[in-house]
């Protein structure tokens, strides 16, 4: 168990806190490109601060500044967007993309006054249909172009806002044993009482688990009952990408699970999925399909008859911020202990003026992440369960995705038969 002070160090993310300073060294998705189809500005909250995200009318350039105008505290979200920045709607003070004051219309032309007033600003750019922002110190690192966001395929993104600290979601990512219990044993119980078939792939017992530090975070491995170290789940594994992603995959589906730390008790949780089964045929897609998944029913109870809903129950029911002074970690929690150690080490790196893990300083086309392909040894069944018994059951293109994977499977079987 942790002390109160240790728990606060891990969970407080405001400006000036050790964890807040670490997290401000990374890029975050904070909106979808489609959010700006009809309006040029949007208020977003990130790392316990409110920001105005804006898009210029002609070039389509994105910028992000603190929402409150330094003049008289009006919201810049209700300002006027120009090609060179944003003008406050209250008194017309104009700010560029770096937070410099360009104009103060009702003031004398006093360059010294303008130079003394600075607005907090970050960087913004698009990737994979989302708007990404960096709100840390200069020089900003490169936005990592992870494969899921830039490779060809059909994409859909499920999102919801959860009332809990982002860290308790991340700790779940290095807790493999929950799979056979929460998504196996418990799911089977729900199936028996609810009259549906729970997926069998998640019910296998974990024989061995392992965690290896790697350049992007922690690589999680497992050997399931009936399997061996030659299976992808051990031989390849899948990574927790520090500090707020987890990458999973299999059966022609690659998914990045994104946990955006809005503030200490709120997380924007996204499931960003890329469907590109071997042999599949699809039309080019300009933007991903976006949908909101549900996690409470009309009576306020957790919806637990799908995989991610079960996870959300476990995360949110711990409370807004898990009280780690009351926990009792065992040997099976080795991954959780490793992750906390990694956060501690990287908080120190930032305090010492060093780049934390996963910092990219060179331009690049793509970052390929290690990830298992043969998931639980049942490709067709796994793809069907992933789509129908996961958050994708809320996707507006669920039937299209099922047809894509089924057609790809049929094409491969036909090719084998005629080989």
Image (cartoon, rainbow, N blue to C red):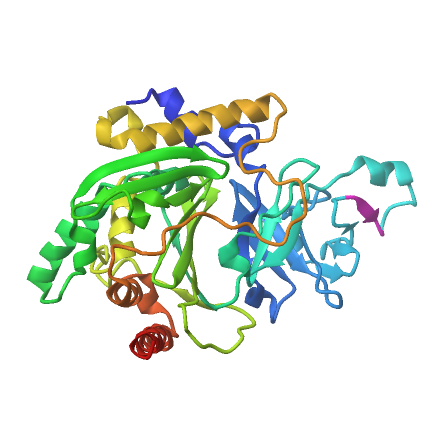
Q: Is residue 74 visible?
A: no
View extreme (front): residue: 419
Left of 345 or right of it: where is 169? left
Q: Nearer the viewer, residue 7 or 270?
A: 270
Is residue 101 covered in magenta?
yes
* Above or below, comparing residue 253 to residue 256 in the picture: below
Q: Residue at x 53, y 53 (%)?
A: 30
View extreme (right): residue: 109
Q: Residue at x 26, y 31 (%)?
A: 333
Left of 69 or right of it: where is 17? left
Please state the horizontal and vertical placement of residue 69, each as a whole percent of the image: 69, 46
* Above or below, comparing residue 177 to residue 37 in the picture: above
Q: Nearer the viewer, residue 352 or 217?
A: 217
Q: Residue at x 24, y 63 (%)?
A: 298
Q: Which residues are magenta?
A: 100-105
Quadrant of image for the C terminus = bottom left
Q: Is residue 231 visible?
A: yes
Q: How many marks?
A: 0
Please state the horizontal and vertical placement of residue 147, each as a whole percent of the image: 51, 55
Give the quarter of the image for residue 27. Answer: top right
Left of 379 or right of it: where is 249? right
Is residue 388 covered in magenta?
no
Please state the horizontal and vertical placement of residue 203, each as a whole percent of the image: 16, 51
* Above or below, comparing residue 406 to residue 243 in the picture: below
Q: Nearer the viewer, residue 419 or 242?
A: 419
Please state the horizontal and vertical placement of residue 241, each as a whole percent of the image: 45, 42
């Amino acid at each position: 168990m942790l002390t109160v002070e240790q728990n606060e160090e891990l969970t407080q993310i405001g400006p000036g806190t050790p964890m807040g300073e670490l997290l401000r060294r990374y890029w975050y998705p904070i909106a979808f490109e489609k959010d700006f189809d009809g309006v040029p500005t949007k208020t977003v909250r990130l790392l316990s601060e409110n920001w105005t995200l804006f898009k210029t009318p002609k070039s389509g350039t994105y910028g992000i500044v603190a929402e409150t105008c330094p003049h008289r505290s009006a919201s810049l979200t209700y300002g006027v967007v120009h090609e060179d920045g944003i003008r406050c709607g209250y008194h017309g003070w104009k700010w560029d993309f770096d937070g410099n004051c360009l104009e103060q219309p009702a003031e004398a032309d006093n360059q010294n006054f303008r130079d003394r007033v600075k607005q907090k600003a970050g960087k913004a750019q698009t990737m994979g249909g989302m708007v990404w922002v960096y709100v840390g110190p200069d020089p900003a690192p490169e936005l990592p172009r992870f494969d899921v966001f830039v490779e060809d395929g059909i994409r859909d993104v499920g999102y919801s806002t959860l009332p809990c600290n982002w860290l308790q979601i991340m700790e779940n990512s290095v807790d493999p044993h929950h799979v056979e219990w929460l998504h196996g044993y418990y799911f089977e119980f729900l199936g028996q009482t609810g009259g549906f078939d729970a997926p069998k792939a998640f019910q296998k017992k974990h024989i061995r688990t392992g965690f290896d530090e790697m350049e992007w975070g922690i690589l999680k491995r497992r050997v399931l009952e009936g399997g061996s170290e030659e299976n992808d789940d051990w031989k390849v594994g899948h990574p927790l990408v520090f500090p707020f992603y987890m990458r999973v995959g299999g059966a022609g589906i690659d998914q990045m699970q994104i946990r955006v730390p809005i503030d200490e008790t709120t997380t924007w949780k996204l499931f960003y999925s890329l469907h590109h089964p071997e042999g599949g045929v699809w039309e080019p897609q300009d933007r991903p399909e976006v949908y909101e998944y549900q996690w409470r029913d009309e009576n306020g109870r957790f919806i637990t008859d799908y995989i991610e809903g079960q996870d959300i129950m476990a995360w949110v029911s711990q409370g807004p911020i898990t009280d780690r002074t009351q926990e009792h970690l065992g040997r099976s929690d080795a991954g959780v202990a490793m992750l906390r150690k990694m956060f501690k080490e990287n908080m120190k790196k930032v305090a010492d003026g060093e780049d934390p893990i996963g910092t990219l300083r060179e331009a690049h086309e793509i970052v390929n992440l290690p990830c298992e392909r043969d998931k639980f040894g049942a490709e067709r069944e796994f793809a069907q369960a992933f789509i129908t018994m996961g958050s994708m059951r809320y996707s507006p293109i669920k039937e299209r995705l099922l047809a894509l994977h089924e057609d790809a499977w049929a094409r491969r079987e036909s090719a084998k038969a005629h080989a």
